[in-house]
């Protein structure tokens, strides 16, 4: 492993880790879902046609 | 008139991100990427790779997410419907069928490869894949398992064990797709993605802590050469700058980004159509993309080639995707301490990566059958099950030299993808328009897209795409045209794609008439 090999690996892996960490930090620290959204929370929604398959 | 949609939606913000990332993360991240990198300059390959990510991958992802939510909030989940909301022209729905035929055809052969992964995981559990150091043993096992020696081999008595694995894989896919977006796909991806990451990290730790491999010592002979994990990392990452002067390197890097992110597949546009109007698309798209890059660069780039090089030497870099994954790596696991356990973990991870991708290929077509033909979920799943079973049966029967699989992959899984991506950039940049596109993308967004990305999507990305498309035609086209001329299975495979496309075009025509009669087009016009 040459110094340039180390450099390419560290920069590549480091950049991706930095980007993924930034994204997850932003996603996980977003404000909670608003109350009006909870009223139509998708988890409460049944797949509409399963109850009436035919 | 109220806009009519399927009523299905994603349950959580993280759920949709994991589902889209799951769709993108597949065998290509762990097998194709390392092979491409090592054959195109090692560490130097990462320069054109990141350029393509910034100019092509991320902008296209944002465009697809934006157009998907745009169509979804106007009552359409399938590409023919979404395209019709953006471009109010009768041709739009027919262009949208390309976004159906791609995932449909790819599913037909991808599910077979997925079943190979499940089969290999199973044979690691039973110990049947611990065949010692002879590489020829693994080649023989693979050839027999996939029936690569002759057509119809797998349908002969006693040879079709892979068909059981295909049956299990089909069953799992269709059970999950039947359960729907939130209860099926999202719930599955929410536990499959962390398990995949865990399995990959376990294998990574194992590879990074391997003692140096001394070639020749396993046979009791003199040590010919000793290779450490650092030598393996060097083989993968040491840059060969001269490769940057070769256009083929830039072509390979752009192609890898393109296929890896699942852009131009017709999948993101469908998944994004289940978002609510206020849901973010910019941060979600970037997060899904970055997750895909994590699996590709941080895990695939550190595991596959370094491990293969340690045990196999420079021959590791000469393997194709299947050779590396299903012949070279089993040989590596056989030589590795606790190899049986890590072999099982590796192929389980590949199976999970494959199933999260194959699920995403079914949903766009299910959505179209439901909203275009008005069929209920039961009927849609049964209808799609029959079509895909016929296609997969075709791939399994014409298994000799994997000509059918390879031909379908080139014409549907490569050429049509470029065509669809160009159509989508045209739709976003020139029909919807970058001003409206930017406004739409930023509705509910938690981060901003830099302004220049919009101009890039309008001018640079289409030219970049066209250049790669021409490059692919120039470099690979002659081989496939020659195969088409000389091999009847290749001709049959192309005919199969054309018949499927023709069938979908007829269905799009029927769907268009239904939407017209139901007043759904009028609703789009009123919403403008």
Image (spheres, grey):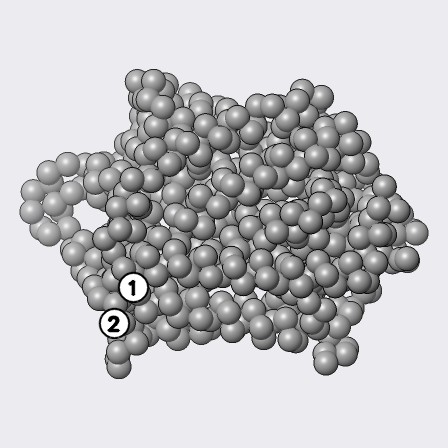
Q: Residue at x 28, y 43 (%)?
A: B479
First of labels 1, 2 by sequence position: 2
Where does the N terminus of chain B fall, quadrant-wise? Answer: bottom right
Q: Which mark is residue B242?
A: none
Name the residue that disc number 2 marks. B153
Q: Is residue B523 above or below residue B500?
A: above
Q: For the residue labelled by badge 1, is the local secondary structure a helix, a strand or a loop? A: loop
**Measured from the top left, where is residue B39 in percent x and y?**
30, 33
Q: Nearer the viewer, residue B39 or A6?
A: B39
Q: Is residue B497 above or below residue B259?
A: below
Name the residue that disc number 1 marks. B399
Look at the numbered discs 1 and 2 and tell me whether their residues touch, using CB distance below 8 Å.
Answer: yes
**Measured from the top left, where is residue B278 in percent x and y?**
83, 44
Q: Is residue B227 above or below residue A12?
A: below
Q: Nearer the viewer, residue B247 or B135?
A: B247
Whether residue B5 can be seen here: no
**Is B137 placed left or right of B207 in the picture?**
left
Q: Residue at x 68, y 25 (%)?
A: B454
Q: Residue at x 77, y 77 (%)?
A: A51
């Amino acid at each position: 492993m040459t110094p340039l090999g180390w450099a390419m690996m560290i920069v590549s892996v480091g950049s991706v880790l930095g980007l993924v960490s930034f994204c997850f930090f932003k996603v996980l620290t977003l404000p909670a879902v608003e109350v009006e959204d909870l009223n139509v929370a998708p988890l409460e929604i049944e797949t509409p046609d399963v109850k009436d398959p035919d | 008139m109220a806009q009519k949609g399927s009523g299905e939606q994603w349950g959580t913000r993280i759920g949709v991100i994991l589902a889209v990332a799951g769709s993108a993360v597949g065998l290509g991240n762990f097998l194709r990427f390392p092979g491409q990198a090592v054959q195109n300059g090692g560490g130097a390959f990462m320069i054109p790779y990141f350029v393509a990510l910034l100019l092509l991958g991320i902008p296209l992802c944002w465009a697809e997410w934006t157009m998907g939510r745009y169509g979804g909030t106007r009552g359409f989940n399938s590409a023919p419907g979404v395209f019709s909301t953006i471009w109010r022209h009768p041709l739009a729905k027919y262009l949208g069928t390309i976004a159906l035929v791609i995932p449909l055809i790819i599913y037909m052969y991808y599910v077979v490869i997925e079943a190979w992964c499940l089969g290999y995981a199973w044979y690691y559990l039973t110990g049947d894949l611990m065949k010692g150091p002879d590489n020829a043993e693994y080649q023989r096992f693979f050839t027999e398992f996939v029936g690569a020696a002759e057509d119809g081999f797998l349908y002969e008595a006693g040879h079709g064990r892979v068909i059981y694995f295909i049956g299990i894989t089909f069953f799992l896919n269709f059970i999950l797709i039947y359960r729907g977006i939130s209860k099926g796909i999202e719930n599955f991806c929410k536990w499959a993605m962390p398990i995949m990451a865990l399995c990959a990290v376990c294998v990574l730790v194992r590879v990074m802590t391997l003692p140096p491999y001394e070639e020749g010592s396993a046979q009791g002979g003199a040590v010919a050469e000793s290779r450490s994990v650092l030598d393996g990392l060097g083989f993968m990452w040491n840059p060969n700058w001269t490769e940057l002067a070769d256009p083929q390197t830039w072509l390979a890097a752009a192609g890898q980004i393109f296929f890896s992110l699942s852009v131009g597949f017709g999948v993101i546009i469908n998944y994004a159509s289940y978002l609510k109007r206020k849901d973010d698309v910019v941060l979600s798209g970037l997060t899904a993309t970055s997750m895909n890059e994590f699996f590709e660069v941080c895990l695939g780039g550190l595991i596959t080639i370094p491990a293969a090089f340690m045990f196999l030497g420079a021959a590791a870099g000469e393997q194709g995707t299947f050779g590396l994954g299903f012949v070279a790596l089993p040989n590596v696991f056989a030589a590795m301490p606790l190899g049986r356990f890590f072999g099982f973990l590796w192929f389980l991870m590949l199976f999970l990566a494959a199933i999260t991708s194959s699920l995403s290929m079914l949903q766009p077509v299910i959505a179209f059958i439901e909203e275009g033909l008005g069929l209920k979920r039961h009927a849609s799943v049964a209808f799609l099950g029959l079509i895909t079973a016929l296609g997969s049966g075709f791939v399994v029967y014409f298994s000799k030299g994997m000509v059918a699989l390879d031909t379908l992959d080139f014409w549907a899984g490569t050429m049509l993808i470029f065509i669809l991506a160009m159509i989508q950039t045209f739709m976003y940049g020139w029909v919807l328009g970058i001003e409206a596109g930017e406004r739409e993308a930023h509705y509910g967004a938690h981060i901003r897209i830099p302004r220049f990305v919009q101009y890039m999507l309008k001018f640079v990305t289409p030219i970049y795409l066209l250049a790669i498309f021409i490059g692919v035609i120039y470099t690979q086209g002659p081989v496939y045209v020659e195969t088409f001329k000389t091999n009847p299975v290749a001709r049959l495979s192309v005919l199969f794609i054309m018949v499927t496309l023709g069938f979908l075009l007829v269905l799009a025509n029927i769907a268009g008439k239904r939407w017209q009669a139901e007043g759904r087009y009028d609703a789009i016009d009123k919403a403008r």
